[in-house]
Amino acid sequence: MSMDQNTVTRLVIDTLAANPKVTHAIKGTTVIVDDLGLDSLAVMDFVMEIEDKLDVSVPLDRLTDIRTVDDLARCLTELKNLR
């Protein structure tokens, strides 16, 4: 099933907001590591959680291009819609 980027963005934001380590407001331009203070392990756990929710797998080489919530949502939307 295809998904639009706004739906995926909302899922990413809601999932991040549910993390007790995240204490800042989150929007599309939020830089996941810098603005939220998540370490690499927390980011990987978060990405795996999102992958499970959307039933997609983000290739490691694509992760290097992801900095913001919008970047992640765009990547996930592309991967989800390729299926």
Image: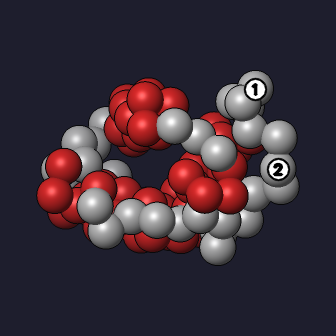
Q: Is residue 41 visible?
A: yes
Q: Can residue 53 be seen in this view?
A: no
Q: Which residue is drawn at 58% across and 40% down?
A: 38
Residue 40 pos. (x, y %): 43, 38
- Pick whichever, 3 or 11, lies toward us: 11
| Image: 1 above or below 20 | below
| Image: 54 above or below 1 | above
Q: Distance between the residues labelled 1 and 2?
A: 10 Å
Residue 49 pos. (x, y %): 45, 30
Q: Which residue is drawn at 53% across and 66% down?
A: 68
Would you say the residues marked 1 and 2 are in contact, meaning their CB atoms lie under 8 Å apart?
Answer: no
Q: Which mark is residue 69?
A: none
| Badge 2: residue crowd in 10 Å (few <14, some 14–19, many ≥20) | few
Q: What residue is disc 2 on?
A: 24
Q: Looking at the picture, which amino acid does disc 2 mark?
A: His
Q: In this view, does 3 lie to the left or right of 21?
A: left
Q: Is residue 22 left or right of residue 33?
A: right
Q: Looking at the picture, which amino acid does disc 1 mark?
A: Pro
| Image: 54 above or below 36 | above
- Secondary structure beneath dot 1 equals loop
Q: Which mark is residue 20?
A: 1
- Pick whichever, 57 or 26, lies toward us: 26
Residue 14 pos. (x, y %): 70, 43
Residue 66 pos. (x, y %): 39, 64
Q: Which residue is drawn at 27% across and 43% down?
A: 56
Q: In this view, does 6 lie to the left or right of 75?
A: right
- Pick whichever, 74 or 44, lies toward us: 44
| Badge 1: residue crowd in 10 Å (few <14, some 14–19, many ≥20) | few
Q: Which residue is drawn at 74% across and 38% down?
A: 22
Q: In which quarter of the image is the C terminus?
A: bottom left
- Secondary structure beneath dot 2 equals loop
Task: Identify the image quadrant of residue 21.
Answer: top right
